[in-house]
Structures are given as C-alpha cells and as structure tokens.
Image: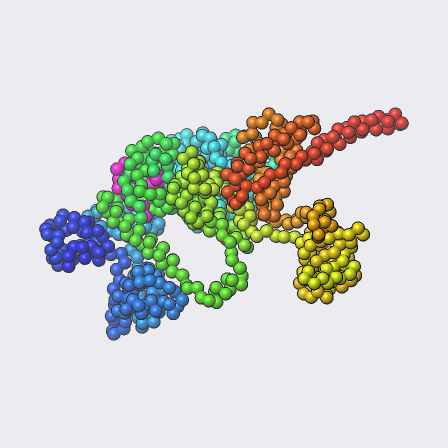
C-alpha cells in the first residue's frame, strides 16, 4: 500500500501522513510501497472516526455501523452492490445517491432487508493523540466530562471565585444591579433598555473577595442564552421586581436553575417604589416552590434597590457566604478548559469569543480547539477591555485568534500543539457534515402529495437572511422568527451569520428574493451602497420585538388582497329587447355603468356590455348573461349593481352620442393596499422633512393615503397649517416636487414594482375642527355669562 492510498483510508492529507512517518523514520521514499510496520503505526495513530467493522458471531450476520455513513460505505459493510442499497431506499420512498450520507436509523432498515443485525458504534467523545500524551491533554466534548476533568487531585486544587448568574424577567433590574455593583452605566447604553447579549463581569467586594457575574437577557426570545448561563454557574441570583412580582420569565429562570442543580438566592428589587409589595412576591415565589428564609424556607433572600444602592452590600455578603459553603476549587496548573459564553465578529479583530475559564490557566499563545474550530490565542482582554496575558479559573476573558465564529455553549480547551488541534477539529467537522448531510435525506414526493398540495394551494414564502453581532444573539433571533405563525405565508431563513452584511449575503438575497434582517449591527456607507446596487432591502434593528413585529407585518403584506363588493343601487328592468348581431338588450330604469355586475332574485348574474340613456331616464343595457337570456331579461326584474357609478356627459357617433360614459371608482379593500398606503404616507412625510427645500411648502402633515387596487395610483390627503393662500401655495409646491417624491418612493419602497402616481388633495378637516373649537370657546363664556345674569 502506498502513502496516498493509506492517507485516503485514514481521512488525512498525504503530506500529513508523510510528515508523521518521516519524523519516526519509518519511510524514506514516499513513492515506494509502505512497510507493514509503518502502516500499522499510522493506523494506530490516526484512527478513522467513522470506522465500522463487520462482526461474525456463530454464523449470524452482524454489522457494526457508525452514526452516519455513505450509501457506498453501507454497501461495502453489507457486501452488496450500492445499486441494491439504493433500490431498498427507493422502496422506502427515500431518494439518495451513491455518495449521499444517511443516518444510523436508515442504515438499520436497509441492513435488516439484507438479513443483517446491526450494532451502533459509539462516537468517541474523548480523543487521545499519541504526540499529545501527557497530563491535561485529553480533549472532551461532553459537559459532564468537562466537570469531571475539573475535579482532579485534591492536592492540586486551589480556591477559585464563585460564578454567579443573574436571572429574572425582562426589565426587573438585573443589569441595573450589576451596574450598581460595578459602578458603571451598562443598562443606559442598551437598546430599548433591555439586555440582548449575555455578559460576564468580574468584580471584587469590599472585603477583597472576587466574584464573577453573568448577566443574561430577560426577554422571552433569549431562552437559550439564559439556559446556557445557568449551566456554567455556581450560584443563581433570581431578581424579582417588588412592583411586578413573579412573571413568566421568572418562572422559566427557576426551572433553569433547578435543571442546573445550583443554589438560588432571591433578590427582590425596586423596594423603593410606592407600589412595591414584598409580601406578595414572597407568596408568589412560595407557589413556585421557592420558600425564602423570611417564611421559614432554605433560600436566601435580599431586599434591595438598584437605583438607590440599598441592599447591594447585603447581596454581595450573601453571595460570598454561599460560595464559602460550596468550597469552590479548581486546578490552575493544567491546560485550560472553559465554555464559550458568547461569540461575535469584531471589526479589526475578526472572530472573538467570551470564554469563561473553569479549570486551568489560559495564556496568550496557547493552541486550542473548540468544536470544529481550532486556533491559537493571539490576545486576551478582561470584561473592561483591558489587555491581559493570562486568565485563571473562574475568569471571563475575551479571546481572539479563532478561524471563525464558534457556537455559543461549545467547550473550549487548550491542547499541546496546533497539529493536535487541527486533527481534532477535522474529526469534529467531518462528523458535523455527516450529520447535516443525513438530515437532508427526505422522502420522495409522490403524485398523491402533488395532488394534495395543488388542492390545498401554494403556500407563499417570506425569505430572510439574518445577520447579527453575536452567535448567542443569532440563536435568539432565529428562535423568535420560528415562533411567528401565519396561515398563508411561511417564513423561510435562506441564510444566517454573524458580522456585517457581505457581498455573498447580498448575492444570496438577490437570487432568493430575500430581505436581509440585521440585529445589533450598524450600517456602513460601503454596505449601503452595495445593497442599493444589488437592489436588496436591508433592515437594521436593535430591539428584538420591533424586528418580529416588522416581519409579521411583512408576512401579512404578502397575502392576496381581499375584494369586497358593495351594493350601491338598484336597477329595474322595464322590457327586454333582442337585436340581431348585438345581443340581448334590457331596458332599465335609472343610470347604469358599462361593466357593472348584476345579481337578481332568481340567482342569475350578468355584466353590462354598454349603456345608452334616453330622455325618460331609462337605460338600455346590452347584457352578457351567465346562464340564459330568458332568465336574465324578464320585465319587472330588479338587480343591484355592485359598483359605484355617476353620470358623465360625452359626445360621439351612433351609440356614443347618447351614451353617458361613467367612471366608476371600484372600491376594493385589501390589507396590502392599506399597508402600502401607510408606508407611502410615512415615506412622503420623511421626504418632505429631509429632502424638500421649497419655501412655498409650509407646515404640512400627511393625514392619509388611499391606494388604488393595482397600487399604481395614490391619493394623498394633505393638511396645511395656515391661511388659504398658504395652503394653496403648499399644495402647488408639493405638486411641483411630485417627480422627486416619486423617485424617492421608488428607491425606498422595494416591495412595489412601480412608483405610484401621486394626487395631492387638501384635507381641511383639522382646520375645520380647530375653527369649531374656537367658536365654542367664544360661545360658551357668553352663555355662561347670560346664565349668571339670569340667576
């Protein structure tokens, strides 16, 4: 066997295999076949993670299979042709190719068809590398094993600071309490006044005891971030506002703390408010199983006010006493192990992550592995942004030097060398891709499925590309979007990522007709110009509920318009007239518009082809009956047109000389037309304020916009404060700027195919109301004076 064949078998590069053999002097000529000893040494050092062997026991056909494998590999394990495996999968309505990866459950079904009994091969969570042999070089991906590794020889353990997670409902004062402790102003700088990213801080009490705090969001969209904070903590401080009491996210925080099996310290905040009710909070907590010591329970409770600072020292003292009871220790002399608390893409530094070191000491220059990502620590910074050279146990630190943004919640561990980190990351990446490929295997679509979908109707999709500033925030945004349910429109996430909008994001959004939604990101001139060139709409948000509200409105805007017919008149048929080559003529009393629809008492319907009026206010209607001419045009029948009409004089030859051509305004109300009208109103107001410099335009306000059914015309009602001459001048100024306004509307409203024609109308309702109010002010005092004189 040659080097390239062995490298392919082991799933590594030929260069890496050759370097391994040459370092051990097992080969010199890489082109020659390898010696058996070299092959065995390479196989023992580079065990393929997906290896599976066939087991023969007492004549029974058995096969040991990994969690995921390709169709070709499964065929080799079962000693059958890949075509036979594909046929079995097609019989189960699963379409695959020879190189497609399937999961263990699917492989088990196929193996059973060929008479095999399969046994799963447990995936290795711990990988030991020969060159990395030594204490503390064991790499783990299991959280339970992480904590077991942290519990080492008691003689090597030293006290460490407690890790405290602050949980509670949104706007109950979690970040404000930390601000009071740190004497900073973090809460004032947060969008919407709510925390939207997990944060870790290290402080020292007045007695010199260090404490690490983890601040988590309280909004319901950040459930995963709160759960992650509870999993890496030693203590939980449950913040409850004295005026609100126990709320939904408070109950959820209690569940997270119980699942993590950590002590709970209750902090009742906002006791300085007038409507504070501390006794009610204690009662509500007792209903959730949290009985405080004030009521004879086991949970510590502190009454405090983050605004005034009252009770903050008592909270810190309680935390220190609770941590002393727990006797928290860790080994600072081993390779560092920690957890990714949050990660994001930072300009100038690349991917960075907030790591909470839980054992060992993290230093600049250490090689590390985190899931399928590996790298070397380039720089470390503490929670205040100051550069540090190392991080001891229970220390939050910002790490830079990663190849890409890691997943929040992944295990971070230092290894002996970059080669070890690269090999482990490659194994994890292979497993991840195999799992993703296995999830892509879907049952085939049958004719019955197509018929059912055609019967139910096509479901529209609202495609989105989601970009955020951090990995944890991305999880929260995606979870919030998944909760949006619309019976007609399905929300589809075609792309997601961390960092600023890139050219690939714009290309993906343009191909898929998607909207790019950015959260906690700021637009740059370059990205704005690129989005305009690509004609892709990019929306920026810093408060999560505003994002979800806009997406909900956008989904509703994709619904088909709802048309409503309005009965506005009656037409009485006097006598039917049948004219050759013309059709059936119905003599009707009153005026009718050409194209009007009719319905009668005998369930017939028709539409007027043309109209012609006589001097006696009677109209001849040339009808196109839906059923039969006889049932439509019987004398004395009455019908109701469903469109609004009015008489307009016109002249022409023959028919047109006596025909009153009627311009009907068909009233079709739809949710989309209303929504577009509101968008047009807001954009016109913005254009008037920022772009129009015409001195004729005074203080104007757009009171309403009525859109036509095809969204090509807009009737804009304008209210102008001032005298009639000033009002007319303002309307003239707006009319002269109509072209500029239409151009800006076409640029801003990307969801419209055409920029609507604008017709400005003066709305004097506000001025009329003001005039009536002034008259009432003049009349009422006069009446009151007459009443007093009469008395």
> In the rendered structure, which segment of residues is drawn in magenta?
351-371
- Out of 660 and 322, give the one closest to the viewer: 660
- Residue drawn at point x = 70 percent, y = 34 percent: 764
**Quarter of the image where one finds residue 199:** top left
**Quarter of the image where one finds residue 444:** bottom left
Residue 420 location in percent, x, y?
23, 47
Q: Quadrant of the N terminus?
A: bottom left
Q: Is residue 151 visible?
A: no
733 to the left or right of 128:
right
- Residue drawn at point x = 35 percent, y = 69 percent: 88
699 to the left or right of 534:
right
**Dominant secondary structure, magenta:** strand
Residue 237 location in percent, x, y?
46, 41
Queried whether the magenta region covers residue 502, the answer comes back as no
Residue 124 location in percent, x, y?
29, 55
Queried whether the magenta region covers residue 358, the answer comes back as yes
- Out of 703 and 728, give the one closest to the viewer: 728
Residue 777 location in percent, x, y?
77, 28
């Amino acid at each position: 066997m040659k080097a390239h064949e062995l490298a392919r078998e082991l799933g590594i590069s030929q260069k890496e295999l050759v370097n391994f053999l040459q370092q051990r002097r097992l080969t010199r000529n890489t082109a020659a076949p390898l010696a058996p000893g070299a092959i065995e040494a390479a196989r023992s050092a580079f065990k393929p993670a997906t290896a599976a062997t066939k087991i023969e026991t007492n004549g029974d056909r058995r096969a040991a299979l990994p969690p995921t494998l390709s169709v070709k590999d499964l065929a080799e394990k079962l000693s059958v042709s890949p075509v036979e495996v594909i046929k079995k999968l097609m019989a189960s309505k699963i379409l695959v190719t020879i190189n497609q990866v399937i999961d263990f459950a699917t492989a088990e079904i196929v193996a059973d068809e060929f008479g095999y009994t399969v046994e799963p091969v447990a995936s290795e969570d711990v990988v030991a590398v020969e060159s990395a042999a030594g204490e503390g070089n064991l790499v783990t991906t299991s959280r339970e094993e992480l904590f077991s590794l942290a519990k080492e020889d008691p003689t090597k353990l030293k006290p460490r600071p407690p890790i405290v997670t602050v949980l509670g409902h949104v706007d109950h004062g979690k970040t404000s309490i930390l601000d009071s402790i740190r004497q900073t102003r973090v809460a004032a700088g947060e969008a919407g006044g709510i925390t939207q990213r997990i944060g870790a801080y290290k402080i020292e009490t007045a007695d010199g005891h260090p404490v690490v705090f983890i601040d988590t969001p309280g909004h319901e969209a950040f459930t995963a971030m709160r759960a992650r904070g509870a999993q890496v903590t030693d203590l939980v401080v449950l913040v409850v506002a004295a005026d609100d009491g126990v709320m939904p996210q408070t109950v959820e925080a209690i569940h997270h703390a119980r699942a993590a099996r950590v002590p709970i310290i209750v902090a009742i905040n906002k006791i300085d408010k007038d409507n504070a009710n501390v006794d009610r909070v204690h009662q509500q907590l007792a209903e959730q199983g949290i009985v405080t010591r004030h009521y004879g329970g086991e949970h510590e409770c502190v009454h405090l006010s983050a605004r005034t600072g009252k009770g903050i020292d008592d909270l810190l003292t309680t935390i220190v006493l609770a941590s002393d009871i727990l006797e928290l220790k860790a080994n600072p002399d081993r390779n560092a192990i920690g957890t990714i608390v949050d990660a994001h893409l930072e300009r100038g530094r690349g991917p960075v992550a907030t790591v909470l070191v839980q054992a060992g000491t993290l230093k600049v220059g250490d090689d590390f592995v985190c899931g399928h990502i590996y790298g070397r620590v380039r720089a470390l910074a503490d929670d205040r942004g100051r550069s540090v050279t190392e991080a001891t146990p229970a220390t939050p630190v910002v790490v830079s030097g990663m190849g890409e943004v890691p997943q929040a919640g992944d295990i971070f561990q230092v290894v002996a060398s970059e080669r070890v980190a690269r090999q482990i990351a490659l194994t994890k990446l292979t497993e991840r891709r195999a799992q993703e490929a296995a999830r892509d295997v879907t049952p085939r679509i049958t004719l019955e499925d197509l018929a059912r979908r055609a019967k139910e109707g096509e479901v529209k999709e609202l495609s989105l590309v989601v970009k955020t500033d951090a990995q944890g925030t991305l999880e929260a945004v995606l979870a919030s979007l998944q909760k949006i349910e619309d019976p007609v429109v399905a929300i589809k996430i075609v792309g997601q990522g961390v960092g600023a909008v890139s050219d690939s994001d714009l290309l993906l959004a343009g191909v898929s007709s998607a909207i790019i939604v950015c959260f906690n990101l700021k637009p740059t001139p370059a990205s704005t110009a690129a989005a305009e060139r690509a004609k892709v709409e990019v929306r920026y948000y810093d408060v999560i509920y505003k994002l979800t509200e806009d997406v909900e409105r956008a989904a509703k805007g994709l619904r088909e318009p709802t048309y409503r017919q309005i009965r506005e008149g009656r037409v009485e048929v006097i006598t039917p007239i049948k004219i050759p080559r013309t059709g059936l003529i119905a003599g009707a009393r009153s005026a009718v518009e050409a194209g009007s629809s009719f319905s009668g008492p005998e369930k017939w319907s028709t539409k007027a082809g043309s109209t012609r009026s006589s001097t006696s206010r009677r109209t001849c209607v040339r009808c196109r009956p839906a059923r039969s001419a006889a049932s439509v045009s019987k004398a004395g029948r009455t019908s109701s047109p469903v469109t609004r009409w009015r008489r307009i004089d016109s002249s022409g030859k023959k028919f047109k000389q006596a025909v009153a051509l009627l311009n009907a305004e068909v009233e079709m109300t739809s949710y989309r037309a209303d929504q577009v009208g509101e968008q047009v109103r807001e954009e016109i107001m913005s254009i008037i304020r920022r772009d129009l410099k015409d001195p004729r335009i005074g203080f104007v306000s757009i009171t309403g916009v009525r859109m036509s059914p095809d969204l090509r015309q807009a009737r804009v009602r304008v209210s102008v404060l001032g005298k009639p001459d000033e009002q007319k001048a303002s309307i003239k100024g707006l009319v002269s700027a109509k072209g500029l306004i239409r151009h800006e509307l076409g640029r801003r409203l990307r969801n419209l195919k055409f920029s609507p024609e604008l017709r400005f109308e003066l709305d004097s309702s506000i001025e009329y109301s003001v005039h009536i109010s002034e008259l009432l002010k003049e009349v009422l005092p006069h009446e009151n004076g007459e009443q007093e004189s009469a008395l």
